[in-house]
Image: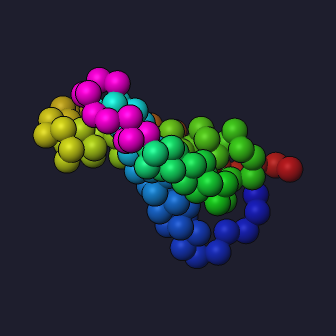
Amino acid sequence: MTFQPPGAAFVTIAIYIGAALAEIAGCFAVWAWLRLGASALWLVPGLAALALFAWLLTLSSADMAGRAFAAYGGIYIVTSLGWLWAAEHQRPTHWDVLGALLCLAGAALILWAPRSV
């Protein structure tokens, strides 16, 4: 395991939250266009948001891309439930919250478990 300076975990989590917001925004732009009848012009900022999402994931402290993507999944799930509540006005159920907590535990294990090199 490589040395992580104090606060590195918080930086990684902030990067993942930013990536999740960018991915959700980009995907919602497509959803709005195809499912809600919004203008195709929604795709322009949507594509920019998806490019931002991909770039942010490259800033992860994970040693391998697959591990970064897998750990990101837990943060994405929690952020998606936040979107559900804030943007779609649907409060997550206790099952949603429990599932999200399990995913966060898995993401932390994937990202920060000790490994032999």
The residue sitting at 51% across, 44% down in the picture is 47
| 112 or 92: nearer the viewer | 92
Does residue 61 appear to the left or right of 36 in the view shown? right
In the image, farthest residue toward the top: 35
Residue 1, by quadrant, is bottom right
| 9 or 37: nearer the viewer | 37
Q: Position of residue 14 (x, y in %)?
A: 47, 62
Q: Position of residue 24 (x, y in %)?
A: 40, 42
The residue sitting at 86% across, 50% down in the picture is 117
Q: In this rendering, does residue 112 appear at all?
A: no
Q: In this rendering, does residue 40 appear at all?
A: yes
Does residue 111 appear to the left or right of 85 in the view shown? right
Residue 46, by quadrant, is top left
Indicate yes or no whether the magenta region holds residue 42: yes
> Colour mode?
rainbow
Region rendered in magenta? 34-43
Indicate yes or no whether the magenta region holds residue 96: no
Q: Position of residue 108 (x, y in %)?
A: 53, 48
